[in-house]
Image: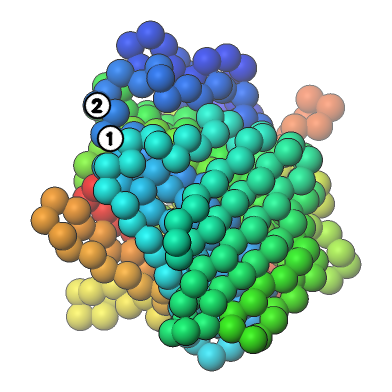
Amino acid sequence: MDIYKTMSPGELLDDKGNLIEAGYAFNLVKSYNRFRIKKNKSRIKEWDYYYIGNDKYGVALTIADNSYMSMVSVTFIDLVNKAEVTKSEIKLFSRGNLALPFTSKEGDSIYLSKKFSMEFVNHGKMRKLVCSVRNFDGKKDFYCNITLEQTMKKTMVIATPFKKMRHFYYNQKINCMKAQGHFVIGTKDYTVDNNRAVLDWGRGIWTYKNTWYWSSMSSVTEDGKDIGWNLGYGFGNNTKATENMLFFDNEAYKLGQVEFKIPHKKEKYDYMSEWKLTSDDGMIQLTFKPIYNRHSYTNALIIKSNQNQVFGVFNGTIKAQYMKNDEVKEISVEIKDMTGFAERVYNKW
């Protein structure tokens, strides 16, 4: 695999609804258009997911239109007390009615109901997340007003094919966004002051049954440099490229294949014991000490989901190779007590 070759600009899908080119890029070079999809429209999945956090707490905000249903969700993660609060609203047969933008570069994602008001406003340079949820935690309401500023010029973008024709996943992760603002639960006001955030922007046609692994971290080093990563695998055909990237000091570095080594206990995953994240070339050597497992399980007829999103602390090193003046150079970054998450998700959807 040539880790230095990226996708070229152009349309994402051909006239038959297949990927024109699979691979990765550092920006959203391909143009997505749901009207070019030739598969049953009820299979289209589109979402905007934001996570804003630090080493004490985090907030996850989701607007998703999965065609046969829409879902909006707000989660508060309390890493100090090892607890969470999640409030979601699901409506059947949305079929694209949320009109989520075809691009993450600009455009607004909005959902309004009696209990939820969620607005992801994106004018290109700045993003504003304004949300309110009635009776979020018992009788306590939730409100947030958070502004995000992109600190990294490069992002993770990947177009993943599947073995089945007209199936694909187009995904962008924007790490290390600077977050400012606040959120309120009841009468308790949490200040978001220079925290870091990630956007998971996804559009595509997935196969019915799949498992994915994903780890994300966005932080700042002791000397003030932005640092983060996107690591993941497990679904689709990733022989064309991986979604693994290191972000450090306003630069992005492509990484090779990664493996999440989750311990087992009595032949079951032991998510709260220490993990190891390693790469096939030895460039990634991370240990992950879990703090809290945000576990959710759904089994409703044809829809089944078993999600384990584990928050914790990373230590280790990440090395990456890059080209400079036609020579291969190497960078090594030490990871010390940095908070992020790693997850394993199994879905039938």
- Seen from this angle, which residue lies furthest left? 301
State the image coordinates of residue 166 (x, y, percent, origin top left). 30, 22
State the mark number for residue 341: none
Q: Residue at x 26, y 53 (%)?
A: 347
Could you tell whether 121 is left or right of 82 in the image? right
Q: Is residue 124 above or below residue 346?
A: above
**Residues marked 2 and 1 touching at CB (< 8 Å):** yes
Q: Secondary structure at mark 1?
A: helix
Front-lying residue, 85 or 215: 85
State the image coordinates of residue 270 (x, y, percent, origin top left). 32, 77
Q: Residues within 10 Å of mark 2 (few under 14, many from 20)?
A: few
Could you tell whether 131 is left or right of 123 in the image? left
Could you tell whether 190 is left or right of 61 in the image? right
Q: Residue at x 52, y 83 (%)?
A: 140
Give the colour scheme of this rendering: rainbow
Give the amino acid at mark 1: Arg
Q: Secondary structure at mark 2?
A: loop
Q: Could you tell me if residue 55 is visible in this image? A: no
Give the amino acid at mark 2: Asn
Residue named by callout 1: 43
Q: Could you tell me if residue 173 is visible in this image? A: yes
Between the C-alphas of marks 2 and 1, the distance is 6 Å
Residue named by callout 2: 40
Q: Residue at x 62, y 24 (%)?
A: 29
Front-lying residue, 271 or 200: 200
- Seen from this angle, which residue lies furthest bottom? 81
User: Which quadrant of the view contains residue 72?
Assistant: bottom left
Front-lying residue, 133 or 203: 133
State the image coordinates of residue 114 (x, y, percent, origin top left). 45, 61
- Seen from this angle, which residue lies furthest top? 15
